[in-house]
């Protein structure tokens, strides 16, 4: 098995330490790849080259940046599909349906970002002095540190890379230590598509040894992190200390409100997709469900039936909804959430233990107290909690009883109820008639409260990865 090196300046580069770490295939917990373990010396090298690459890339014509991103999308669509599918399945434990969706979303993101290269709009505004002209110029930031998670390791990385590149920044990527191979493959495709090799680099390794020296480096001009709230709070502090922009997309505990006018079976099917897709390893997963008491009993019976009918395990089968969690720690965390909820008075409606290997059963808890970790913390696994509410107002209050504010879902046909919930729920997005896990390359995705700072997607990403400069001009001959 050939080890994977760092990808710096278009080259495979051995790590300064000479060390390689093991990446396991979560389906069998066997070795999937040996990957270079970067430290601050490697990070320094990548940043220095990215800094000099920025000078030319930031001045490249928009059509040049646009063409490279469009070509990357074409390469993935026409040649990369099979290879990327295999990596997502074997490295990150993605079911093939999720992996396919992720790759198509990646293509969409690249094309959307390509369009943004031509939209670095500025502005003008009136001045009371008729001899003065005021304008606002938009410009890229410099070198962006991109720190990515394991759960959708291609699409979420693309989001944090394609938009900064479109705006003329250079990037140094620190992918999750669980899923470095997909990031290496992606960066190589971008260079093949025409992104200059000085402008995109991948340093693989661990958070403290590789991620920390990257985000703390004095030549980093912006930090993009998609990851846990704990990491986000730390990196946010680092960014504020250096006064650089930080886009932080963090954890969630997204609520689904199930109101009394819906068919409980149809609502249960939507909620089951919203929580069990990719085994709940989705930041916007419907991990809390608040059901109106009028249909509560029918709903929980239907959700139990849905959960028990799901196909889990064989990642290469199109009907499989999820397979293994990423690692043993993830399994232990969800088991601890279930056990402590039960100890606090919750009831297991279905599931509640490991099925086999790292595959955890689709699990539904009812009556979880709002103090137990299954309710308050992100489980990031196939676990949801269902509670009852007697009114819409009470359901909204329960939804807002969380330190997170990423996404929410409202299942109703009544538009007055829907809009009352949309206005009342404190979250970065609210989806009506759908589950809370939605994506769109143009949408402003992000959260309130501890779910993060900033928004990503389309023009919202351009805003994050650029800055503006006020320019005023005195138009007279008096100087
Ligand atoms: P994580 O926070 O453990 O790791 C994310 C990345 O940060 C990894 O690359 C890790 O190595 C790095 N890192 C850790 N400590 C660091 C440090 N001190 N300095 C620099 N880098 C450091 O997250 P994860 O477990 O990989 O991903 C799952 C989390 O991501 C969940 O909480 C999930 O909700 C969140 N997430 C959020 C969104 C969103 O859009 N809001 C999307 C996907 C995932």
Image: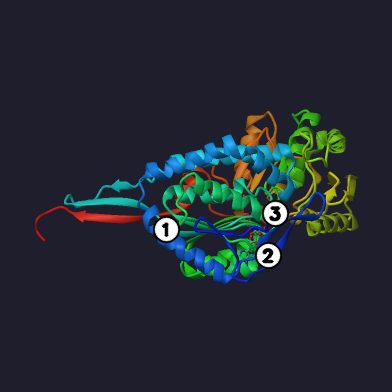
Taking 71 as reference, is 186 left or right?
Answer: right
Could you say whether the residue bearing mark 1 is in a helix, strand or loop? helix
Task: Tell me the CA gap for discs 1 and 3.
Answer: 43 Å
* Precedes in sequence: disc 1 or disc 3: 1
Residue 376: x percent and y percent? 75, 56
Task: Tell me the CA gap for discs 2 and 3.
Answer: 40 Å
Which dot marks residue 402? 3
Q: Which of marks 2 and 3 is in front?
A: 2
Residue at position x 48%, y 69% in the image: 242
Residue 237: x percent and y percent? 56, 67
Task: Tell me the CA gap for discs 2 and 1.
Answer: 28 Å
Closer to the camera in the image, 466 or 288: 466
Taking 436 as reference, is 319 left or right?
Answer: right
Which dot marks residue 53? 1
> Mark 2 = which residue?
20
Could you say whether the residue bearing mark 3 is in a helix, strand or loop? loop
* Precedes in sequence: disc 2 or disc 3: 2
């Amino acid at each position: 098995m050939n080890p994977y090196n760092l990808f710096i300046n278009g080259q495979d580069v051995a790590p300064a330490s000479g060390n390689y770490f093991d990446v396991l295939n979560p389906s069998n917990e066997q070795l999937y790849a040996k990957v270079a373990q970067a430290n601050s010396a490697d990070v320094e090298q990548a940043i220095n080259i990215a800094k000099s690459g920025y000078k030319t890339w930031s001045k490249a014509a928009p059509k040049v940046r646009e063409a490279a991103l469009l070509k990357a999308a074409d390469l993935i669509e026409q040649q990369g599909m099979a290879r990327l599918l295999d990596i997502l399945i074997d490295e990150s434990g993605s079911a093939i349906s999720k992996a396919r969706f992720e790759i198509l979303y990646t293509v969409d993101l690249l094309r959307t970002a390509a369009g943004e290269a031509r939209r670095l709009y500025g502005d003008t505004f009136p001045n009371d002095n008729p001899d003065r002209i005021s304008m606002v110029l938009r410009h890229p930031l410099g070198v962006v540190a991109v720190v990515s998670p394991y759960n959708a390791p291609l699409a979420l990385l693309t989001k944090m890379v394609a938009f900064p590149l479109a705006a003329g920044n250079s990037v140094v990527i620190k992918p999750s230590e669980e899923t470095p191979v997909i990031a290496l493959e992606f960066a190589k495709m971008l260079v093949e598509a025409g992104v200059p090799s000085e402008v995109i680099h991948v340093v693989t390794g661990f958070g403290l040894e590789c991620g920390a020296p990257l985000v703390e480096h004095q030549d980093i001009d912006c930090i993009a992190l998609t990851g846990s709230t704990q990491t986000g709070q730390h990196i946010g502090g680092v960014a504020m200390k250096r006064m650089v922009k930080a886009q932080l997309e963090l954890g969630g505990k997204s609520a689904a409100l199930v109101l009394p006018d819906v068919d409980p079976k149809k609502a249960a099917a939507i909620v089951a997709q919203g929580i069990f897709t990719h085994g709940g390893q989705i930041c916007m997963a419907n991990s809390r469900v608040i059901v109106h008491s009028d249909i509560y009993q029918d709903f929980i019976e239907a959700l139990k039936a849905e959960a028990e009918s799901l196909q889990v395990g064989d990642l290469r089968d199109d009907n499989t909804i999820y397979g293994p969690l990423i690692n043993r720690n993830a399994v232990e965390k969800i088991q601890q959430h279930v056990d402590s909820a039960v100890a606090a008075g919750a009831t297991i409606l279905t599931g509640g233990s490991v099925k086999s290997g790292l595959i955890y059963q689709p699990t539904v808890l009812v009556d979880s107290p709002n103090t137990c970790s299954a309710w308050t913390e992100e489980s990031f696994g196939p676990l949801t909690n269902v509670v009852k509410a007697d009114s819409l107002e009470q359901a909204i209050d329960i939804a807002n009883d969380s330190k997170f504010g990423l996404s929410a879902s409202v299942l109703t046909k009544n538009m007055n109820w829907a809009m009352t919930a949309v206005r009342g729920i404190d979250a970065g997005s609210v989806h009506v008639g759908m589950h809370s896990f939605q994506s769109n390359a143009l949408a402003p995705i992000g959260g309130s409260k501890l779910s993060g700072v900033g928004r990503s997607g389309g023009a919202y990403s351009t805003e994050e990865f650029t800055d503006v400069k006020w320019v005023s001009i005195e138009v007279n001959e008096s100087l």
